[in-house]
Image: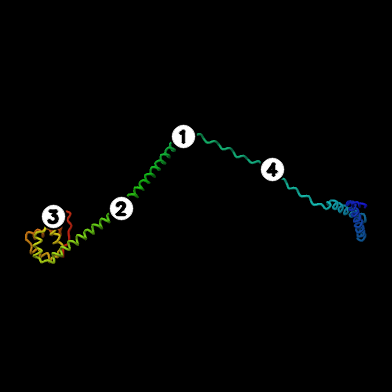
Amino acid sequence: MAKIPTPRLLPATIAALGALLLLKSGVLLQTAITNGQKPESVMVAAANAASTDQTSETAKPPAANPAPVAAPKAAAAAPSLSAPAPSPPPPVSESEKALLQDLRQRRQELETHAATITARESVLAAAEQKLAARVTELKTLQQKLEGLDAAQKQREEAGWQGLVKLYEDMKPKDAATIFNDLSMPVLVQLMDRMKDAKAAFVMAAMNPDKARDVTAELAQMRTGRDASGAPIAGLKIKPAGG
Protein backbone atom coordinates (compact mmCIF):
# COMPACT_ATOMS: atom_id res chain seq x y z
CA MET A 1 0.00 0.00 0.00
CA ALA A 2 1.48 3.32 -1.10
CA LYS A 3 2.13 5.93 1.63
CA ILE A 4 0.46 9.30 1.03
CA PRO A 5 2.87 12.17 1.67
CA THR A 6 1.86 14.66 4.34
CA PRO A 7 0.84 17.98 2.75
CA ARG A 8 2.97 20.95 3.73
CA LEU A 9 1.10 23.94 5.16
CA LEU A 10 3.43 26.75 4.14
CA PRO A 11 3.14 26.31 0.29
CA ALA A 12 -0.63 25.96 0.62
CA THR A 13 -0.81 29.12 2.66
CA ILE A 14 1.27 31.03 0.11
CA ALA A 15 -0.95 29.84 -2.72
CA ALA A 16 -4.08 30.89 -0.85
CA LEU A 17 -2.62 34.32 -0.14
CA GLY A 18 -1.73 34.75 -3.84
CA ALA A 19 -5.26 33.93 -4.90
CA LEU A 20 -6.64 36.32 -2.32
CA LEU A 21 -4.27 39.03 -3.56
CA LEU A 22 -5.45 38.61 -7.14
CA LEU A 23 -9.06 38.75 -6.04
CA LYS A 24 -8.54 41.94 -4.00
CA SER A 25 -6.53 43.54 -6.81
CA GLY A 26 -9.34 42.94 -9.28
CA VAL A 27 -11.93 44.36 -6.93
CA LEU A 28 -9.83 47.42 -6.11
CA LEU A 29 -9.02 48.01 -9.80
CA GLN A 30 -12.66 47.86 -10.75
CA THR A 31 -13.60 50.21 -7.93
CA ALA A 32 -10.87 52.68 -8.85
CA ILE A 33 -11.95 52.75 -12.46
CA THR A 34 -15.48 53.34 -11.35
CA ASN A 35 -14.44 56.21 -9.03
CA GLY A 36 -12.02 57.77 -11.54
CA GLN A 37 -8.78 56.91 -9.67
CA LYS A 38 -5.44 55.96 -11.26
CA PRO A 39 -4.73 52.25 -11.66
CA GLU A 40 -1.12 52.65 -10.36
CA SER A 41 -2.21 53.91 -6.94
CA VAL A 42 -4.77 51.17 -6.69
CA MET A 43 -2.15 48.50 -7.41
CA VAL A 44 0.21 49.93 -4.75
CA ALA A 45 -2.53 49.88 -2.15
CA ALA A 46 -3.43 46.30 -3.05
CA ALA A 47 0.21 45.25 -2.75
CA ASN A 48 0.49 46.85 0.70
CA ALA A 49 -2.72 45.16 1.84
CA ALA A 50 -1.52 41.79 0.58
CA SER A 51 1.86 42.25 2.28
CA THR A 52 0.12 43.08 5.59
CA ASP A 53 -2.17 40.03 5.33
CA GLN A 54 0.76 37.78 4.49
CA THR A 55 2.77 39.07 7.40
CA SER A 56 -0.10 38.60 9.86
CA GLU A 57 -0.86 35.12 8.59
CA THR A 58 2.71 33.93 8.64
CA ALA A 59 3.29 35.42 12.11
CA LYS A 60 0.63 33.17 13.65
CA PRO A 61 2.04 29.82 14.94
CA PRO A 62 0.29 26.76 13.54
CA ALA A 63 -2.14 25.43 16.26
CA ALA A 64 0.31 25.92 19.07
CA ASN A 65 -0.54 26.98 22.60
CA PRO A 66 0.83 30.37 23.57
CA ALA A 67 3.96 30.17 25.58
CA PRO A 68 3.45 31.09 29.20
CA VAL A 69 4.74 34.46 30.13
CA ALA A 70 7.71 34.12 32.41
CA ALA A 71 7.17 35.65 35.82
CA PRO A 72 9.44 38.53 36.50
CA LYS A 73 12.17 37.81 38.91
CA ALA A 74 11.76 39.31 42.33
CA ALA A 75 13.86 42.36 42.85
CA ALA A 76 16.77 41.79 45.10
CA ALA A 77 16.10 42.91 48.59
CA ALA A 78 17.80 46.09 49.52
CA PRO A 79 20.48 45.56 52.12
CA SER A 80 19.11 46.38 55.56
CA LEU A 81 20.74 49.18 57.37
CA SER A 82 22.55 47.91 60.44
CA ALA A 83 21.46 49.50 63.76
CA PRO A 84 24.06 51.66 65.37
CA ALA A 85 25.97 49.91 68.13
CA PRO A 86 24.82 50.98 71.64
CA SER A 87 27.14 53.25 73.43
CA PRO A 88 28.85 51.69 76.46
CA PRO A 89 27.49 52.76 79.87
CA PRO A 90 29.37 55.48 81.65
CA PRO A 91 31.84 54.29 84.24
CA VAL A 92 30.60 54.10 87.85
CA SER A 93 32.55 56.10 90.38
CA GLU A 94 33.57 54.84 93.79
CA SER A 95 31.05 57.09 95.55
CA GLU A 96 28.25 55.74 93.39
CA LYS A 97 29.38 52.18 94.11
CA ALA A 98 29.34 52.94 97.84
CA LEU A 99 25.90 54.51 97.54
CA LEU A 100 24.54 51.51 95.64
CA GLN A 101 26.00 49.12 98.18
CA ASP A 102 24.50 51.18 101.01
CA LEU A 103 21.10 51.15 99.32
CA ARG A 104 21.33 47.39 98.78
CA GLN A 105 22.20 46.82 102.42
CA ARG A 106 19.40 49.14 103.50
CA ARG A 107 16.93 47.22 101.37
CA GLN A 108 18.05 43.94 102.92
CA GLU A 109 17.59 45.43 106.39
CA LEU A 110 14.11 46.63 105.51
CA GLU A 111 13.19 43.21 104.13
CA THR A 112 14.49 41.55 107.31
CA HIS A 113 12.58 44.04 109.45
CA ALA A 114 9.40 43.44 107.43
CA ALA A 115 9.79 39.68 107.83
CA THR A 116 10.25 40.14 111.60
CA ILE A 117 7.13 42.30 111.81
CA THR A 118 5.16 39.73 109.82
CA ALA A 119 6.29 36.96 112.18
CA ARG A 120 5.34 39.06 115.22
CA GLU A 121 1.95 39.82 113.74
CA SER A 122 1.38 36.10 113.22
CA VAL A 123 2.34 35.40 116.84
CA LEU A 124 0.10 38.23 118.08
CA ALA A 125 -2.80 36.99 115.96
CA ALA A 126 -2.42 33.50 117.41
CA ALA A 127 -2.21 34.95 120.94
CA GLU A 128 -5.31 37.06 120.33
CA GLN A 129 -7.21 34.00 119.16
CA LYS A 130 -6.18 32.06 122.27
CA LEU A 131 -7.06 35.03 124.48
CA ALA A 132 -10.46 35.42 122.82
CA ALA A 133 -11.14 31.71 123.33
CA ARG A 134 -10.06 32.01 126.99
CA VAL A 135 -12.31 35.04 127.52
CA THR A 136 -15.21 33.13 126.01
CA GLU A 137 -14.54 30.23 128.37
CA LEU A 138 -14.36 32.59 131.36
CA LYS A 139 -17.61 34.29 130.38
CA THR A 140 -19.29 30.92 130.07
CA LEU A 141 -17.91 29.90 133.46
CA GLN A 142 -19.03 33.21 134.99
CA GLN A 143 -22.54 32.76 133.65
CA LYS A 144 -22.59 29.24 135.03
CA LEU A 145 -21.38 30.43 138.45
CA GLU A 146 -23.92 33.25 138.47
CA GLY A 147 -26.64 30.76 137.66
CA LEU A 148 -25.48 28.49 140.48
CA ASP A 149 -25.29 31.44 142.89
CA ALA A 150 -28.77 32.59 141.94
CA ALA A 151 -30.11 29.06 142.41
CA GLN A 152 -28.36 28.86 145.80
CA LYS A 153 -29.85 32.19 146.89
CA GLN A 154 -33.27 31.07 145.77
CA ARG A 155 -32.94 27.90 147.85
CA GLU A 156 -31.73 29.91 150.86
CA GLU A 157 -34.51 32.44 150.46
CA ALA A 158 -37.03 29.65 150.17
CA GLY A 159 -35.68 28.19 153.42
CA TRP A 160 -35.90 31.55 155.23
CA GLN A 161 -39.39 32.15 153.93
CA GLY A 162 -40.45 28.75 155.27
CA LEU A 163 -39.15 29.64 158.74
CA VAL A 164 -40.74 33.09 158.63
CA LYS A 165 -44.10 31.59 157.72
CA LEU A 166 -43.71 29.12 160.55
CA TYR A 167 -43.13 31.83 163.17
CA GLU A 168 -45.79 34.11 161.69
CA ASP A 169 -48.36 31.35 162.14
CA MET A 170 -47.35 30.89 165.79
CA LYS A 171 -48.72 32.93 168.63
CA PRO A 172 -46.60 36.08 169.21
CA LYS A 173 -45.82 35.04 172.83
CA ASP A 174 -44.61 31.61 171.78
CA ALA A 175 -42.51 33.05 168.96
CA ALA A 176 -41.05 35.67 171.34
CA THR A 177 -39.99 32.96 173.79
CA ILE A 178 -38.01 31.26 170.99
CA PHE A 179 -36.57 34.52 169.62
CA ASN A 180 -35.17 35.44 173.03
CA ASP A 181 -32.78 32.49 172.80
CA LEU A 182 -31.83 32.80 169.09
CA SER A 183 -28.47 34.19 167.96
CA MET A 184 -28.59 37.71 166.63
CA PRO A 185 -27.66 36.91 162.95
CA VAL A 186 -30.46 34.35 162.68
CA LEU A 187 -32.93 36.53 164.57
CA VAL A 188 -32.20 39.54 162.35
CA GLN A 189 -32.78 37.49 159.18
CA LEU A 190 -36.10 36.21 160.50
CA MET A 191 -37.34 39.57 161.79
CA ASP A 192 -36.28 41.30 158.56
CA ARG A 193 -38.42 38.93 156.44
CA MET A 194 -41.47 38.95 158.70
CA LYS A 195 -44.37 41.24 158.03
CA ASP A 196 -44.23 44.39 160.13
CA ALA A 197 -47.57 43.69 161.83
CA LYS A 198 -46.50 40.18 162.86
CA ALA A 199 -43.01 41.31 163.90
CA ALA A 200 -44.46 44.08 166.11
CA PHE A 201 -46.49 41.63 168.21
CA VAL A 202 -43.53 39.27 168.54
CA MET A 203 -41.13 42.06 169.58
CA ALA A 204 -43.66 43.32 172.16
CA ALA A 205 -43.61 39.91 173.80
CA MET A 206 -39.83 39.53 173.69
CA ASN A 207 -37.29 40.39 176.36
CA PRO A 208 -36.85 44.21 176.19
CA ASP A 209 -33.06 43.99 175.97
CA LYS A 210 -33.26 41.44 173.17
CA ALA A 211 -35.90 43.47 171.40
CA ARG A 212 -33.72 46.59 171.66
CA ASP A 213 -30.67 44.79 170.23
CA VAL A 214 -32.56 43.29 167.32
CA THR A 215 -34.09 46.70 166.55
CA ALA A 216 -30.59 48.25 166.33
CA GLU A 217 -29.42 45.47 164.04
CA LEU A 218 -32.46 45.85 161.79
CA ALA A 219 -31.88 49.60 161.58
CA GLN A 220 -28.28 49.11 160.53
CA MET A 221 -29.31 46.51 157.95
CA ARG A 222 -32.06 48.62 156.41
CA THR A 223 -30.36 52.02 156.50
CA GLY A 224 -26.71 51.02 156.03
CA ARG A 225 -25.64 53.09 159.05
CA ASP A 226 -24.51 52.14 162.54
CA ALA A 227 -25.79 53.48 165.86
CA SER A 228 -23.70 56.67 165.53
CA GLY A 229 -25.13 57.41 162.06
CA ALA A 230 -21.94 56.53 160.15
CA PRO A 231 -22.43 54.40 157.02
CA ILE A 232 -21.49 50.76 157.34
CA ALA A 233 -18.98 49.70 154.70
CA GLY A 234 -20.00 46.74 152.58
CA LEU A 235 -23.48 46.52 154.00
CA LYS A 236 -26.32 46.16 151.52
CA ILE A 237 -29.57 47.85 152.43
CA LYS A 238 -32.56 45.51 152.33
CA PRO A 239 -36.12 46.70 152.00
CA ALA A 240 -38.35 46.40 155.03
CA GLY A 241 -40.53 43.32 155.22
CA GLY A 242 -44.19 43.82 154.72
Badge 4 element: loop
Name, please, the residue furthest toward the top.
94
Mark nearer the N terminus (4 vs 2) = 4
Q: Closer to us: mark 4 or mark 2?
A: 2
- Quadrant in which residue 33 is drawn: bottom right
Q: Closer to us: mark 1 or mark 2?
A: 2
Badge 3 element: loop
Residue 213 in percent (x, y) is at: 9, 58
Q: Closer to us: mark 3 or mark 2?
A: 2
Q: CA distance from mark 3 to mark 4?
A: 122 Å
Mark nearer the N terminus (1 vs 4) = 4
10 Å crowding of disc 3: few (<14), some (14-19), many (20+): few
Q: CA distance from mark 4 to mark 2?
A: 90 Å
- Quadrant in which residue 98 is drawn: top left
Mark nearer the N terminus (1 vs 2) = 1
Q: Which residue is mark 4?
A: 76
Q: Are marks 1 and 4 in contact (CB under 8 Å)?
A: no
Q: Nearer the viewer, residue 241 or 49?
A: 241
Q: Closer to us: mark 3 or mark 4?
A: 3
Mark nearer the N terminus (3 vs 2) = 2
Q: CA distance from mark 1 to mark 2?
A: 60 Å
Q: Which residue is mark 1?
A: 97
Apparent side of residue 37 relative to residue 166 in the rendered image (left or right): right
Amino acid of disc 1: Lys
Q: Which residue is mark 2?
A: 137
Amino acid of disc 3: Ala
